[in-house]
Amino acid sequence: MKQKVMEVLQAILAENIEDQMIEVPVYTRLGDYALPCFPLAKKMKKSPVLIAEEIAALIKDSSIEKAEAVNGYVNIFMKRTGFTQSIMNEILSDSNQYGSSNIGNGRVITIDMSSPNIAKPFSMGHLRSTVIGNSISLLHEKSGFQPVKINYLGDWGTQFGKLLVAYRLWGNEKQVQEKPIESLLMLYIRFHKEAEQDESLNDKGRAAFKSLEDGDPEALALWKWFRTESLKEFQKIYDLLGVSFDSYQGEAYYNDKMEPIVEELNQKNLLMESNGALVVDVGEHMPPCLIKKSDGATLYATRDITAAIDRFTTHQFAKSLYVVGNEQSLHFAQLKIVLNKMGYEWADSLQHIPFGLILKNGKKLSTREGKIVLLEEVLKEAIQLAEANIEEKNPKLLNKKEIAQAVGVGAIIFSDLKQHRKHDIEFDLKKMLQTEGETGPYLQYSYARACSILRKAGEVESFHVTEVNDHEWEVIKQLEIFPQIVSRATTELDPSVVAKYAVSLAQTFNSYYGNVQIVTNSNLMEYRVSLVHCVVIVLGEALRLLGIQAPEEM
Ligand code: ARG
């Protein structure tokens, strides 16, 4: 509709009308769109009031009901019935394809996401990366890209040498099998404690990692086992979240692929020696990028450089995203510069997608010694709370367990995505599970309410729009902008655009539901029920794009 208004104004003004020149008034009585004439006054050498009056008088179009000049604004009212009929037809025939596009044209976009560290707890940061990455992937898929979700596991590095030593000294097979993450973490913590007394432990750790790098079968077998057990634990979380990956190639995968890259850096004259270590100079504003330690060990950066090149060779990506916390900004800035210096033009399509912290009572949730917040337990607590809510509100509901899972997990996902990812977020389970306000359960309740109207009304064959009241019109205007919302969220890599949209769609739907009798015996029923059907399609699709399930009953 906005496009139409822009065309009409363009023809009258004979000048380029840009999207942001047209406002959407807060109150429907001020029209559907408004053109403020103040910016035009200088150029046209007339008062805005006069300009508005002239323009309003010239607006004549079959899609526009009327145009009014008010205090320097042209307020434009659209013809409701025609638009309503055609938007609803479009949504009902496209169904869940509504809002899909081919902006991506099949281009590949790799998304480095989740990427927890083996033998360590899955942190709140990894939760954010998983949830944000998943939504960015779903958005790109809807916009015609081909996303590749990569779980770049932290499964390599000197810490695994320490873990091997600790396990050989104090480990217990059964314990690791029963509680892999917890018991491996305890071993790691014990290693550090004992190393304070016994210096030789650190040397043993280094030697153990060296043996791992060199492919010692016994070390490798233990490492593989730690990895498998840890992955089993992580898988429980992914199952609860409903997230899957296209690849689990982590840091270890690049162990035997780094040498040629170090050699390439050398050939291209990029390596410098600094205190025995090999580094790449990345300019004055940043510390140099460490490629090899003085003992010849490779580093996090070495592996990421190798992985980036490998990903481009494999996927020829149009974009390569890294959904990783703010605190790694320097690392990704260095990565990009090094790849640029190596002459890889595609380095410019690498993009770090940073995000803020999850706080509890204003403090960072962390893995303090001996006290670990296991994410699986947090998710389970959310599910339990959701179940208690359901038990209270709707004890007769079938599949309570499944629905509680969708609600508990949905609440956590929504609270993560509702603000721009760069903000820190306060983790408050009770608050995010409320069914009022901007929460996941609020959206799910709204969706279930709409579904129950459809169940009550039964099949509706066809409908004919004869009049559109203000409540219906508000819903229509929300439904109409969904495709723009999807494309904006995709290009801005910002799921919160969809999250905020879902809230306003649910709000307008709820006020429609509260003010208009939908299931009536008048001839308006078919149209009104069909409008609810459109809401079910679009709200359901918005929730899906956030990675949130939408139960039909709650
Ligand atoms: N495993 C790392 C961590 O937990 C995150 C890895 C992010 N991805 C990457 N390509 N560096 O901090």
Image: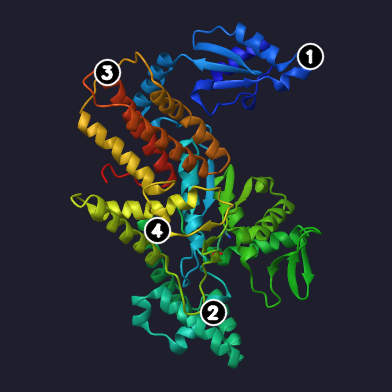
Q: Residue at x 76, y 58 (%)?
A: 282
Camera-nearest residue between 220 and 157:
157
Q: Nearer the viewer, mark 2 or mark 3?
A: 3
Q: Residues within 10 Å of mark 2 (few under 14, many from 20)?
A: many
Residue at label 2?
Answer: 161
Alpha carbons under labels 1 and 4: distance apart: 58 Å
Q: Are marks 4 and 3 in contact (CB under 8 Å)?
A: no
Find out if the beta carbon at label 4 lies less than 8 Å from the nearest ligand 1 atom.
no
Amino acid residing under circle 1: Lys
Alpha carbons under labels 2 and 4: distance apart: 41 Å
Find out if the beta carbon at label 3 lies less than 8 Å from the nearest ligand 1 atom.
no
Q: Residue at x 39, y 26 (%)?
A: 471
Work out whether residue 41 can be spotted. yes
Alpha carbons under labels 4 and 3: distance apart: 43 Å
Residue 337 image point, x, y percent: 72, 54
Camera-nearest residue between 387 and 434:
434
Amino acid residing under circle 4: Lys
Above or below, 423 against 11 in this view is below
Q: Nearer the viewer, mark 2 or mark 4?
A: 4
Residue at label 1?
Answer: 45
Residue 554 image point, x, y percent: 27, 46
Label 4 secondary element: helix
Residue at label 3?
Answer: 462
Q: Nearer the viewer, mark 4 or mark 3?
A: 4
Alpha carbons under labels 3 and 1: distance apart: 53 Å
Alpha carbons under labels 1 and 2: distance apart: 76 Å
Label 3 secondary element: loop
- Indicate the quadrant where residue 82 lies: top left
Q: Residues within 10 Å of mark 3 (few under 14, many from 20)?
A: few
Q: Taking the image as four quarters, which one is ligand 1 found in?
A: bottom right
